[in-house]
Image (cartoon, rainbow, N blue to C red):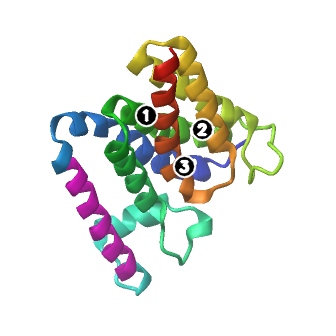
Amino acid sequence: MKDSKTILKELFRKSIHICSATLPWFFVNYYWYTVYGLYIIVVLYYFCEIARLEGHPIPVVSLITETASRSRDECKFVLGPVTLVFGIVLAALLLPLECAKIGIFALAFGDGLASLGGKLFGHVKIPHAGGKTLEGSLTCFIAVCVSTWYVCRNIPASLLVAFSAMIIEVFPLGDWDNMLIPIMTGSIYWLLKLVF
């Protein structure tokens, strides 16, 4: 039986990831406003985190951070929101929007659901993967395959992007996978567009 408190914490944390799937719509309709808005959010978050660490928590932001943070982040600057935003913004700045959308969806759904799948159903640990499970990786693969197909309607490309996202996600990268997944999966799709 999985620890329900751990599951609820992970569900809350990953719901933030999944909410980032709304950002491609904002990039399409309000590109620069969205870029600058996300930068402003990161700067505000930075100062809220510094205040929290110095014993002056900011009511809503610090509560969300403490609720969503992992045990490894205890008494530390919680880096996840920063890498999440930077990964999304870099994908939007460096890639065509269709490719960035696929990368953002890979982060939102693939990385977001992989951890939940692993926590809920995970039994088979992947060696040297920092506790990640085969079930979590398969959840990532399926989520990215479906979300990529939704964008491009191309089965071979969807399978290859999903496989790439699963490989990136399985490495024990901490919060840095938030930056790598959208940029790398979006770039892989960009290259695949030349082939398919």
The crowd level at tag 3 (other Cα within 10 Å; few <14, some 14-19, many 20+) is: many
Residue at the disc numbered 1: 105
Q: Amino acid at mark 3?
A: Glu
Q: Nearer the viewer, residue 172 or 3?
A: 172
Image coordinates of residue 120 in percent, x first then y, are 65, 38
Main structural element of the magenta stretch: helix, strand or loop?
helix
Over which residues does the magenta segment extend? 34-51
- State the CA–CA distance, disc 1 to disc 3: 19 Å
| Left or right, residue 102 beside residue 130 | left
Q: Within the magenta stretch, is there residue 47?
A: yes
Residue at the disc numbered 3: 10
Residue at the disc numbered 2: 114
- State the CA–CA distance, disc 2 to disc 3: 11 Å
The crowd level at tag 1 (other Cα within 10 Å; few <14, some 14-19, many 20+) is: many
Residue at image x 80%, y 42%? 126
Residue at image x 52%, y 18%? 195
As displayed, is residue 169 above or below residue 144?
below
Q: Are marks 2 and 1 in contact (CB under 8 Å)?
A: no
| Left or right, residue 126 beside residue 39 | right
